[in-house]
Image: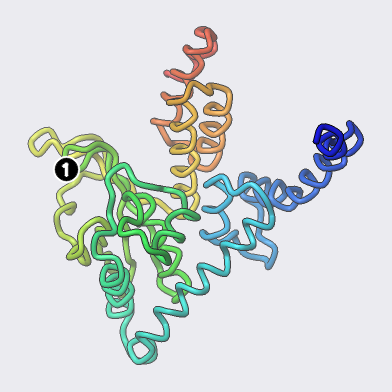
């Protein structure tokens, strides 16, 4: 038995070859992430689409895994299109947007989970799989926006510093006919939601206590994924990995105050207090 086991052990050269093969598989992802962070045009002359950016930020590690999840977006898109084909042929943007929303909730009526997943890969698996829960507000907003964009709808997101007394919150914003429609993905009746209309665009409304509302595009949404990944590393004491992801969030969203603060706190944890002070300003 010992002799058989010895034959299975890898030599240093074999281990190096495996490492090089693994690194080679990831070259495309490194290149794609560099394109994303530097704000360059995508492979087909346009900005990188939200699905690809979200998968990269979510921590998909290999090209094989990356290529496995993109078809899942297409599969989900096709299921909705097949079910609502008449609506998408003749309906208005408002009707199409509501059709997508209603379909997602019909298939997964308990899909929101406080503290649930924000990673697009995990959210896709949950929506397509057996799980009752799909994701948190970021995860559900990402999924909805990815699908809405596939159907040609103009959507963004809105960020609140505090909502429902639970802290930072995200939801979808539909732009159609010269107006905006809030889509609150955590409620089954959240389409054309009116509850956030009173949130000020800047600062905090002292009378209502509602936190400021910032409208975000795809880059800011992807920045929030990096920020959430960083928070997970922070919670497990992996300060350097946390800082790496806070930096990516800041690169994509230079006005993301919370990312600056959290990076500063991570630096303090590493004993780099003088450097940390620069991030608290």
Q: Residue at point 57% right, 58% down? A: 52
Give the image location of residue 19, x and y in percent: 80, 39
Q: Is residue 70 above or below residue 196?
A: below
Count neighbours of disc 1 (C-alpha within 10 A) and say few if under 14, some if 14 to 19, many if 20 or more: few
77, 252: nearer the viewer: 77
Occupied quadrant, residue 104: bottom left
SS for tag 1? loop
Give the image location of residue 196, x and y in percent: 18, 52
Q: Residue at point 33% right, 79% down? A: 96
Give the image location of residue 23, x and y in percent: 78, 43
Q: Is residue 29 above or below residue 277?
A: below
Left or right side of 126 for 198:
left
Q: Is residue 199 above or below residue 206?
A: below
214, 242: nearer the viewer: 242
Occupied quadrant, residue 164: top left
Q: How many marks?
A: 1
Left or right side of 85 for 277:
right
- Residue corresponding to mark 1: 164
Furthest residue in direction left, as rendered = 207
Left or right side of 216 for 45:
right
């Amino acid at each position: 038995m010992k002799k058989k086991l010895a034959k299975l052990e890898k030599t240093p050269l074999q281990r190096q070859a495996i490492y090089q093969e693994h690194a080679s598989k990831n070259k495309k992802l490194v290149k794609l992430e560099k394109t994303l962070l530097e704000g360059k045009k995508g492979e087909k002359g346009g900005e990188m689409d939200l699905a690809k950016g979200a998968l990269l930020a979510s921590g998909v590690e290999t090209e094989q895994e990356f290529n496995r999840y993109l078809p899942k977006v297409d599969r989900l898109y096709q299921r909705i299109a097949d079910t609502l084909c008449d609506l998408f042929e003749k309906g208005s943007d408002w009707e199409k947007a509501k059709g997508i929303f209603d379909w997602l909730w019909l298939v997964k009526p308990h899909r929101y989970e406080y503290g649930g997943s924000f990673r697009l890969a995990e959210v896709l698996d949950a929506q397509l799989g057996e799980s009752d829960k799909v994701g948190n507000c970021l995860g559900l907003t990402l999924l909805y926006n990815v699908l809405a964009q596939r159907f040609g709808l103009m959507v963004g997101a809105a960020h609140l510093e505090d909502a429902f007394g639970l802290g930072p919150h995200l939801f979808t914003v539909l732009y159609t006919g010269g107006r905006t429609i809030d889509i609150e993905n955590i409620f089954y009746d959240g389409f054309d939601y009116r509850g956030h209309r009173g949130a000020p665009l800047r600062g905090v409304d002292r009378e209502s206590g509602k936190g400021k509302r910032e409208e975000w595009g795809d880059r800011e949404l992807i920045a929030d994924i990096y920020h959430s990944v960083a928070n997970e590393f922070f919670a497990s004491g992996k300060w350097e990995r946390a800082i790496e992801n806070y930096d990516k969030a800041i690169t994509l969203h230079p006005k993301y105050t919370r990312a600056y603060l959290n990076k500063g706190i991570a630096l303090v944890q590493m004993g780099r207090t003088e450097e940390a002070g620069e991030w608290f300003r």
